[in-house]
Image: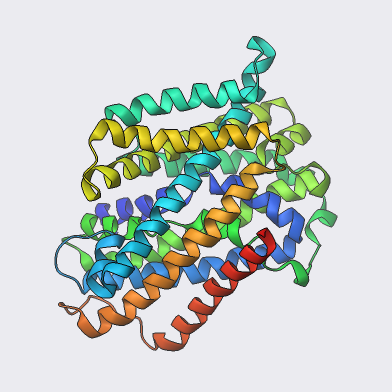
């Protein structure tokens, strides 16, 4: 495979595997391991088709666009408005989740030496991340391949230490009635739709490889998520699982794995926070004509305020709660819009694409029903 194809695959994997991976074992332990693995595979396949739809949309359209641009072109102003809401809601949800969990991780590492509380460490993290966002330093822009390799290495290290200590009974639970319980968190963990237009740019001179890049770049995270869930749930069990996975996992395997896990989680969320924060800043600046300084303030102020509120009111498992709601609302809405855009692009597209998803009408209806049911189910549960 050509070098740019490897880079495109790494870009999609890097966009996909972020802090969401840390929430997966918690929801799978609550639903039952067998139930959760089925969720990981089925939701992963659904997202694979959504990503392929976006790839086909981009290949049928002249010029470079992001999801909001495609929504505007094929659905009109209402479509652009809903896609903008979906992206902003999803980005803010991610930033809030990262801020809450970074505070917990940093507190676990540094409080024995320096004292303090979780709010202080969340504030420290926000200050450091905000400096990079204000300066506009794209710290992770071209590091996707290295980050993917680092994630793979750490997961392999986890596997070496964890496999001998897996308790088989932790992996035998199947609860069909809890099938949709992990839905929101797993959907959040797969959200990388905005990466597909970037893949098209990376493969601009080799567009025939876009389909292959999307398939490989979406399937690899399915296996990584399943393996990570196997290790953490198998070792920790439902009684020791934590909503960020690492602390409970490390408590069972020992301090060396706890430190490595906390480092893994901290770096993953920090790079994700900066990448998402910069994308949100650019959206405010370019799409809404807000100046750069004020855009940066908008980016950091919302997660600051909401994270402090969540910590102060001591809401149970806030990381899980934010990932769940964000995944269902943002991912579900964006998924529905992508399906509708795909229908219109097949009719109104300007270019013959390098690939086309055949017989997609029935599949598209199934995907819409999945996203609609997930959103309704989550909202009814929440309220």
In the picture, which quadrant includes the C terminus?
A: bottom right
In the rendered image, residue 243, in percent from the top left (x then y), is placed at 68, 44
Q: Residue at x 36, y 24 (%)?
A: 131
| Position in image of residue 380 (x %, y %) | 66, 66
User: Could you tell me if residue 115 is visible in this image?
Assistant: yes
Which color mode does the image show?
Answer: rainbow
Front residue of 136 and 154: 136
Residue 274: in sight, yes or no? Answer: no
In the displayed structure, 376 sits above or below 65; it is below
Q: Residue at x 63, y 52 (%)?
A: 24
Which residue sits furthest top?
114
**Residue drawn at (55%, 48%), measured in percent from left and top?**
20
Image quadrant holding the N terminus, namely bottom left
Vertical side of 204 occupied by 351: above or below = below
Q: Would residue 146 appear left or right of 170 to someone viewing this image?
A: left
Q: Quadrant of residue 97?
A: top right
Task: Answer with left or right where residue 81 lies relative to residue 189.
Answer: left
Q: Is residue 369 left or right of residue 238?
A: left
Front residue of 235 and 359: 359
Q: Which residue is pictured at 31% across the width and 40% down the height? A: 281
State whether residue 304 is above or below residue 149. Answer: above
Along the line of sight, the residue nearer the viewer: 134 or 304:
304
Question: Disc count in the image?
Answer: 0
Q: Where does the image place residue 199, in percent across and percent down from the top left? A: 28, 57
Residue 321 coordinates in the image, percent (x, y) = 63, 49
| Residue 120 placement, left or right of 251 | left
């Amino acid at each position: 495979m050509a070098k740019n194809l490897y880079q495109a695959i790494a870009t999609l994997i890097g966009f996909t595997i972020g802090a969401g991976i840390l929430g997966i074992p918690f929801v799978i332990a609550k639903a039952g391991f067998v139930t959760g693995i089925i969720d990981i595979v089925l939701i992963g396949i659904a997202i694979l088709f959504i990503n392929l739809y976006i790839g086909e949309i981009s290949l049928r359209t002249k010029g470079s666009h992001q999801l909001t641009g495609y929504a505007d072109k094929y659905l009109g102003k209402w479509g652009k408005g809903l896609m903008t809401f979906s992206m902003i809601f999803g980005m803010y949800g991610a930033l809030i989740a990262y801020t809450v969990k970074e505070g917990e991780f940093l507190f676990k590492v540094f409080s024995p030496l320096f004292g303090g509380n979780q709010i202080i460490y969340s504030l420290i993290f926000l200050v450091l991340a905000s400096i990079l966002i204000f300066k506009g330093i794209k710290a992770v822009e071209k590091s996707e391949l290295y980050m993917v390799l680092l994630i793979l290495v750490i997961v392999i290290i986890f596997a070496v230490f964890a496999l001998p200590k897996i308790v088989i009974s932790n992996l035998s639970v199947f609860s069909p009635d809890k099938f949709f319980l992990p839905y929101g968190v797993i959907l959040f963990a797969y959200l990388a739709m905005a990466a597909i237009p970037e893949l098209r740019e990376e493969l601009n001179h080799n567009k025939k490889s876009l389909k292959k890049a999307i398939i490989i770049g979406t399937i690899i995270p399915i296996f990584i998520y399943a393996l990570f869930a196997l290790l953490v749930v198998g070792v920790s069990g439902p009684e020791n699982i934590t909503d960020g996975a690492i602390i409970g996992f490390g408590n069972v395997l020992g301090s060396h794995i706890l430190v490595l896990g906390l480092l893994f989680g901290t770096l993953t969320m920090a790079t994700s926070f900066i990448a998402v924060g910069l994308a949100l800043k650019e959206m405010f600046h370019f799409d809404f004509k807000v100046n750069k300084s004020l855009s940066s303030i908008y980016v950091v102020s919302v997660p600051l305020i909401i994270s402090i509120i969540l910590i102060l009111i001591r809401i149970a498992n806030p990381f899980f709660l934010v990932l769940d709601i964000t995944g269902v609302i943002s991912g579900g809405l964006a998924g529905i819009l992508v399906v509708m855009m795909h229908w219109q692009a097949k009719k109104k597209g300007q270019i013959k694409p390098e690939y086309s998803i055949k017989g997609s009408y029935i599949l598209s209806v199934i995907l819409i029903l999945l996203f609609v049911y997930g959103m309704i189910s989550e909202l009814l549960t929440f309220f």
